[in-house]
Image (tube, helix red, strand yellow):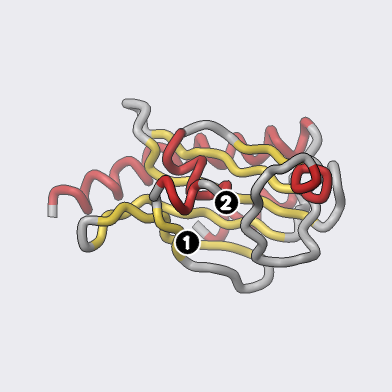
Amino acid sequence: LQALVEATLHAAAADWLGVYCRFERDGQARLVKLAYRGLPSRGEFPLTEDFAVFSNNSRVGLSGRAAIVADVAAWQAAGGAYYECDPKVQSEVCLPVLAADGRVVGILDAEDARPGFFGEAEQAALVALALALSAPFGRLAGAVEKS
């Protein structure tokens, strides 16, 4: 998994990239970070409506719809809520990882200190990673749910 993160960063040289898998623990769904490169950050995001109000990771994990923020400062100035792990972050792409049946089984989150960093080529590399994670995360989520 770490090798996939590293390979993706060769094509989309963002400052930070992490992959999270959806797990249930104590009756609560959450996203758990399994691999990343960049500064240390939050390891889990609750999948609740309350947390999704200000967290792209939780919002994408609940909705299954991508979140692309080209300019964090402009997003916030326009009233967008934003969970800040690193104050240097100026752009973000958060994508769902979907199982074959459409269930959200994880997300990936990429961030960079440059506004507008994630162009078509960078987004395509991130989509390729999300697609590559689909089957293994789907199997992992299914195995955890059955245990």
Front residue of 119/80: it is: 80
- Residue at 45% x, 63% y: name it: 44
Q: Residue 66 occupies which quadrant of the picture?
A: top right
- Which numbered disc, 1 or 2, marks the residue that appears first in the sequence? 1
Q: Is residue 77 visible?
A: yes
Q: How many marks?
A: 2
Residue 88, position as x, y percentages in the image: 80, 64
Q: Which residue is mark 2?
A: 54
Q: Is residue 117 visible?
A: no
Looking at the image, which residue sits at the far bottom?
40
Looking at the image, which residue sits at the far top?
101
What amino acid is labelled 1 in the image?
Answer: Lys
Which structural element holds mark 1? strand
- Residue at 83% x, 44% y: name it: 74
Which structural element holds mark 2? loop
User: Viewer-nearest of labels 1 and 2?
Assistant: 2
- State if disc 2 and disc 1 touch (CB < 8 Å): no
Answer with left or right where residue 16 lies relative to residue 74.
left
Front residue of 134/47: it is: 47
Disc 1 to disc 2, how far (Cα)? 18 Å
Q: Residue 127 occupies which quadrant of the picture?
A: top right
Q: Quadrant of the C terminus?
A: bottom left
- Residue at 37% x, 50% y: name it: 22
- Residue at 21% x, 62% y: name it: 26
Residue 90, position as x, y percentages in the image: 80, 53
The disc label shown at residue 17, or none: none
Residue 54, position as x, y percentages in the image: 57, 51
Answer with left or right where residue 142 lies relative to residue 77.
left
The disc label shown at residue 33, or none: 1
What amino acid is labelled 2 in the image?
Answer: Phe
Answer with left or right where residue 69 lies relative to residue 83.
right
Residue 45, position as x, y percentages in the image: 45, 58
